[in-house]
Image (cartoon, rainbow, N blue to C red):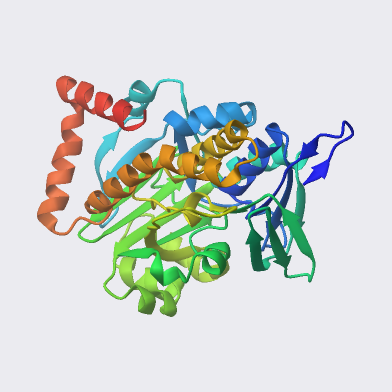
Amino acid sequence: MALDFTGTARRRAVVVGAGIAGLAAATRLRHIGWDVLVVERSPTRRSSGYLVNLTGPGYDAAERLGILPALGARDLGFLTSVLIRADGRRTFTVPPALAQGALGGRAVTAFRGDLEAALHAAAEGAAEFRFGTTVRAVHQDANGVQATLSDGGTVDADLLVGADGLHSGIRRLVFGPEADFRLDLRHVVGALPLDRVSREVPDRTSATFIGPGRTAAVINLGPGRSSAFFTYRCPDVDGELARGATESLTSAFGDLGGPVPDVLRQLGANPDLVYFDSVSQIVAESWSRGRVVLLGDAAWCVTLFAGRGAGLALAGADRLAAALSDHGDDVPAALRGWESSLRAEVRKRQSLARKGMSQYAPPTRAHVWARALAIRAIHLPGVRVLVQRAVRRANQ
């Protein structure tokens, strides 16, 4: 704890991780008068990533963080969705007006990298950053917490925020090994940026193949902004990851036609650009220990099947700062109150993700057929209204 020029004690936080959760936490903590140090393992700020959607509480948090004007300039809006067969032929089109009518104007779709850029711009003047640095050890008592950094230095603070993702080092150091908290859903996911997209996928369109146990999607947003996404069910996740992205994804999707073969060729030429990992949730009985708190994927990781990870990270950071502001010097009490305010929402999203896996990897051809039939029914006026109402409720 330091003193400012008025003699008032200023509290200090160390935030580990310069992703969405960490940058949002740094910005909001500075809003309530804290000094913030952000520690990030990567040597530079990341700039890539897949699409994220901000609705409901996530959109509200982005508004309070002051990043909506920057995101508005990068908002991708609503895309046309085209379902394709294994050979690339179209089967059905879902117009963007469906989502537009359900969500109205309080929604933003952006690349993860663009969201992180907006958050970094907001946090840059509010926090100190140390890239290429990790936390090696953590010690705490009733009065504070000390982080030993990989550069040999130590930092004393009132709060340590572990916002370092699914494979959190802070969670391992303070709470225990990852295996105690990680729930594998027996699926893997791959995502990669594309230099080019086949002419079979029109501009501002997502072409998606859904088959038994797997999904492939190619999103055309123009040069330098297009991407591909894969997920599939896998009984031996560790073995699949050990094979590597190129071999595993080619084996799982190499039989598909349409835009997929060119995507796999780009993957083979640039294997380092792909994100390839297990689909896992983090389930922890508590997200804080004394003055150390986990945030975002490090705490709960609802997975891509839930579709609300970025929004929950923003909302979690926003509420964390509010709780710390309300509880004054009692940091542990603030963390307990913050956790109780988020638990129900996180449990709901994790449950929906586990139930919703069949949407991304239907168990059988019968499930694929039933899903396609349900999507086709959207064009019926009465069904469309029901779907839009359901989307609005899910995003409140």
Residue 269 makes an appearance in the image? yes
Tell me: residue 332, above or below residue 232: above
Residue 117 makes an appearance in the image? no
Tell me the quarter of the image containing the C terminus: top left
Tell me: residue 179, above or below residue 50: below
Residue at the spot x=38%, y=61% of the render?
280
* Frontmost residue, 132 versus 220: 132
Q: At which x and y percent is residue 154?
A: 77, 64
Residue at the spot x=62%, y=31% of the render?
65
Q: At which x and y percent is residue 369?
A: 13, 48
Residue 10 as seen in the image, left or right of residue 144: right
Q: At which x and y percent is residue 119?
A: 64, 40
Residue at the spot x=69%, y=43% of the render?
120
Tell me: residue 24, above or below residue 264: above
* Frontmost residue, 360 versus 280: 280
Instruction: Count the marks.
Output: 0
Q: Residue furthest front?
A: 142
Give the quadrant of residue 114. top right
Q: Residue furthest left?
A: 366
Residue 362 as seen in the image, left or right of residue 26: left
* Frontmost residue, 165 versus 371: 165
Q: At which x and y percent is residue 373?
A: 13, 40
Give the quadrant of residue 372. top left
